[in-house]
């Protein structure tokens, strides 16, 4: 099997009969196993559809819950795309008490089991132990077993980094393009008469062009109450019109400052359910966005030419934010270097700098120019053709 590594996406081309040198004009069969978060799954499901449109078969593998949440492939592509549910293993010991009974998985009967005090002692003694290196999370080892890297990016955005990776690991690095969000609009988003969209559009239509800041931190990130409070006061202090997608409030885990919605109701919306993000971003009233800097979220926002105010939290979000700041299409909210805290004043100042201040005009212009690259169908199609050609080249024949 051909091993490919792509930003927490594993793909394999299934061996099939070729001409003995790894090359074949026969259709490919590609297996995809993306990372188990919807922000990763959606773009690569679009990639699966693109591959299928070229006449190749795709087996798309993920957890049962995620497969159930995904949109169905178009009717014309159903014969070529197979969605496979991969159940995740479950540990039967869900509590300390459950470990006080004989195991049920043995093929013979036994009375052997731990007593509660023994389990408690074992847990308590392990509390202060430090873990060593965990091999299965060693990305460098994962990289070393790859034939090539496929990355959701483009040379226009990260050309120098692609060259560096290719040189460092001595393997081909193939950008598959940015997978434009215009190709990822769900069936729900396509419905112009969707009640949520009708209400949102009516409000956006009432705002001045390029005046509204769209605020969203994705479905995976959980803000602390302290950060949410400071963020809300900063948004209020900025005086800017805003649309804030804040689904966590509906789940009851967080609370906005008392009176916030009443004080800002004339210029802002706090949306507490699913929001049609792509349709909102495409509206002319949006003038910029505040983001946690998840890669998929950033691509969607810059696709529409919006300047970014970044507040990164997890994993590679901070580095992605710095890269965008370096490109002068984003401004990062200043934070305490030691504990990561930020103030409402810094939020307000950064928002105004990005959206309305004359000093931030160049950032807004740069974002519009980069948006032309992100949304270019010609550029995207070129990357897809190269991607398919690479899969054909590296496919290993069956024996």
Image (cartoon, rainbow, N blue to C red):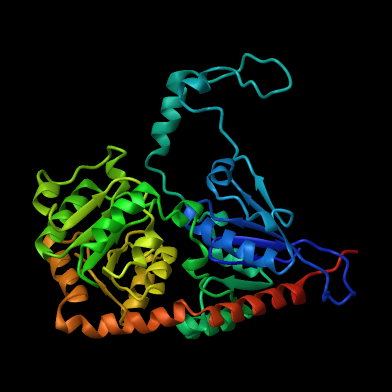
The answer to which quarter of the image holds residue 346 is: bottom left
Task: Determine whether, in the image, residue 214 is placed left or right of residue 5.
Answer: left
Tell me how many marks there are.
0
Q: How far from the left and from the top, in percent, is residue 227?
A: 21, 53
Q: Position of residue 316 (x, y in %)?
A: 41, 65
Identify the residue at horizontal 79%, vertical 67% (top origin): 27
Please report the residue visible at 18 percent of the width from the left and 46 percent of the height from the top. Answer: 256
User: Residue at left 40%, top 62%?
Assistant: 278
Q: Is residue 18 above or below residue 214?
A: below
The image shows residue 271 at horizontal and vertical percentages of: 27, 49
In the image, taking residue 5 as reference, residue 347 lies left or right, namely left
User: Which of 271/61 is in front?
Assistant: 271
**Residue 238 visible in the shown view:** yes
Pick the quarter of the image with the C terminus.
bottom right
Query: As displayed, is residue 152 above or below residue 74?
Result: below
- The quadrant of the image that shows the N terminus is bottom right
- Asked whether the viewer can see residue 327, the reply is no
Res 218 → quadrant: bottom left
In the image, is 337 to the left or to the right of 260?
right
Q: Nearer the viewer, residue 82 or 233?
A: 82
Q: Nearer the viewer, residue 132 or 103?
A: 103
Report the side of 150 relative to 247 (left or right): right
């Amino acid at each position: 099997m051909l091993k490919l590594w792509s930003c927490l996406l594993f793909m394999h081309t299934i061996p099939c009969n070729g001409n003995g040198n790894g090359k074949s004009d026969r259709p490919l069969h590609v297996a995809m196993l993306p990372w188990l978060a919807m922000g990763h799954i959606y773009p690569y499901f679009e990639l699966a559809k693109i591959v299928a449109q070229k006449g190749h078969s795709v087996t798309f593998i993920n957890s049962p819950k995620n497969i159930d949440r995904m949109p169905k492939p178009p009717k014309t592509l159903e014969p070529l795309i197979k969605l496979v549910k991969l159940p995740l293993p479950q540990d039967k010991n869900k509590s300390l008490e459950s470990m006080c009974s004989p195991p049920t998985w043995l093929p013979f009967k036994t009375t052997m089991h731990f007593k509660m005090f023994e389990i408690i002692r074992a847990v308590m003694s392990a509390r202060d132990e430090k873990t060593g290196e965990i091999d299965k999370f060693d990305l460098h080892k994962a990289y070393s077993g790859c034939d090539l890297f496929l990355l959701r990016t483009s040379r226009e955005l990260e050309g120098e980094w692609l060259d560096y990776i290719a040189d460092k690991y001595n393997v081909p690095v193939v950008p598959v393009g940015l997978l434009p969000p215009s190709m990822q609009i769900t069936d729900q988003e396509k419905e112009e008469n969707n009640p949520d969209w009708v209400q949102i559009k009516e409000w956006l239509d009432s705002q001045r062009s390029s005046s509204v800041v769209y605020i969203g931190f994705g479905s995976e990130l959980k803000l602390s109450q302290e950060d949410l409070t400071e963020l809300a006061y900063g948004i209020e202090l900025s005086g800017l019109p805003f649309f804030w997608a804040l689904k966590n409030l509906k789940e009851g885990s967080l609370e906005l400052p008392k009176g916030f919605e009443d004080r800002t109701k004339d210029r802002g919306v706090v949306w507490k359910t699913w929001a049609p993000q792509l349709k909102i971003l495409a509206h002319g009233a949006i003038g910029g966005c505040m983001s946690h800097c998840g890669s998929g979220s950033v691509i969607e926002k810059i696709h529409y030419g919006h300047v970014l105010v970044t507040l990164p939290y997890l994993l590679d979000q901070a580095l992605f934010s710095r890269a965008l700041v370096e490109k002068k299409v984003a401004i990062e909210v200043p934070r305490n270097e030691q504990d990561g805290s930020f103030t409402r004043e810094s939020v307000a100042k950064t928002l105004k700098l990005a959206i309305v201040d004359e000093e931030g005009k160049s950032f807004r212009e740069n974002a519009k120019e980069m948006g032309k690259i992100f949304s270019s169908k010609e550029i995207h199609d070129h990357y897809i053709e190269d991607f398919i050609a690479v899969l054909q080249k590296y496919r290993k024949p069956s024996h």
